[in-house]
Amino acid sequence: MNSPTVVIVKPGDQKRLYGALSEFSLTAVEPPLWAALLGGYLRSHGHAVELLDAEVEGWDGAETAARIKALNPLLAVISVSGSNPSASTMNMIGAGHVLRNLRDIAPEIKTAIHGLHVSALPARTMDEEHVEFAFEGEGFQALVDLVEALQSPAPGFRIPGLWYRENGRVCANPRAPVCADLDALPQPAWDLLPMTRYRAHNWHCFGHIQDRQPYGVLYTSLGCPFNCSFCCINTMFGKPGIRLRSPERVIEDLDGLVTRYGIRNIKIIDELFALNEDRVIDLCDRIIERGYDLNMWAYARVNTVTPRMLARMKKAGIHWVAYGFESANERVLKDVDKRYDASTTMKIVDMTYQEGLYVLSNFIFGLPEDDFDSMQQTLNMAMDINAEWLNIYAAVAYPGTRLHDQAIAQGWALPASWSGYSPYARDSLPLPTRHLTAGEVLSFRDYAFHAYYENPRYLAKIQRLFGLDTVRHIQDMTRHRLQRTHRQFGEAEIPGVQTGA
């Protein structure tokens, strides 16, 4: 077997990032879109590529490094771009373990790192990690140019978007422009990954929770036109904005997932899929024509969905809609540039239910203007919505966000380790607010999780929709209590808290 020119690696360190929940298999294990996109792009330029997914394989840093060494590539690229804003920074723990182990056992293999976190903190990444190159931005052409430079007898690294070392110092090139035409990108290199082994979220398969595999992701756009201060999704792209793929290319990718890999559980990975009614309906009509029996979910905003859009999404097999409500308090929302009218929330939720879709609610406790009253107001809204699934986060200052810049300017404590950016880790450290400590925020978040999922009204709805087995699954889930270093209160001690049940 000939050695590949490049090995692209998705790192994994699930136990440290998810604590006891990693053993309960609540979370999804998603195929790494960015690794597959980079792999496909390299291959289209004639370079031999291998993809390694340490997360799905369960490899630690030492095992991953040993696998890379056995393949003996010219270049090993660690990809730390997850499928949501929180997934990149916390995966720097696993990335660092791989790089340190690889340096120890195979220092002759060149190393590079790519991802949203890297684009946010390229200089710090080069300073802290045992890595020779880092990519700021998407990195498609920069990666090809780097490989070709390394193959040259006199390599030069004046490559847009590339950070590198020269004579003991770190050097940077200007950021490269983003790919203007997403249709020019080849299909993701899914054939280089174990596609039958990926696993959907537990809630995505409520009612048939034993059928979470296989699982795939589909992208129809990159970026987001909004600029919420707590979100880092546009960091890799340099600014807010959205680029759309053609419906023909989207359907080509979908056909491959369904016919080649037998995948029915699919996440539409766009940061904001339900944006333009005409485009969403066009895509849905093309999916409906194929007669696939799909179980999909997608992100939306309260102020972008319409009844016609939702009805067509449901018919196409998009059964779940994820809304970023974030907070029920207008003062809190305005402060973070989350531009929607919270008073319209229940109207949109009712409209979504009327069209037969399930709701995934996303809320954040501990945004800068939050106090106990506003967090209670948000929890009450979550209880009123009574969504089939609720993601509850404590606000974290992810690198690349304006909140991160604000935290540094204000001298607020940031996590001492990248694992502290994980919402479920033992050392998770959210932001303090102007009124609350980080410990108070984290305590309220963990209290709210159990108040919601142990609420009899919620459990009765789940039993009606999905059956008693799903209720028992949720009850088993709530028996797990997250261990926290920074928790300030026990649940019964939080000032002013009401159950809302």
Image (cartoon, rainbow, N blue to C red):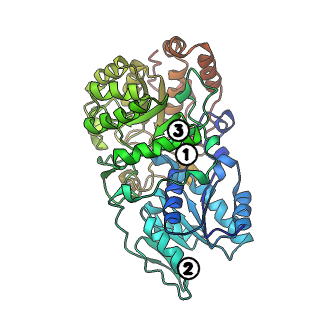
Q: Residue drawn 39% across and 21% down?
A: 385
Query: Which of pointers 3 and 1 indicates the residue nearer the eye?
Result: 3
Question: In front here: 336 or 409?
Answer: 336
The secondary structure type at the circle numbered 2 is helix
**Is 56 rendered above or below residue 66?**
above
Work out whether mark 2 precedes mark 1 in sequence or the reverse, and give the earlier one. Answer: 2
Work out whether mark 3 precedes mark 1 in sequence or the reverse, and give the earlier one. Answer: 3
Query: Which of pointers 2 and 1 indicates the residue nearer the eye?
Result: 2
Residue 475 at x, y = what percent? 62, 20
Q: Residue drawn 42% across and 70% down?
A: 161
Question: In front here: 96 or 82?
Answer: 82
Q: Is residue 84 left or right of residue 333?
A: right
Q: Residue drawn 41% across and 54% down?
A: 404
Examine the rendering and report whether any part of residue 289 can be seen.
yes
Specify the label residue 150 is tagged with. 2
Q: Is residue 232 left or right of residue 425?
A: left
Q: Which residue is mark 1?
A: 422
Q: Which residue is mark 3?
A: 258
Residue type at numbered disc 1: Ser
Residue 496 at x, y = what percent? 44, 24
Question: In front here: 260 or 239?
Answer: 260
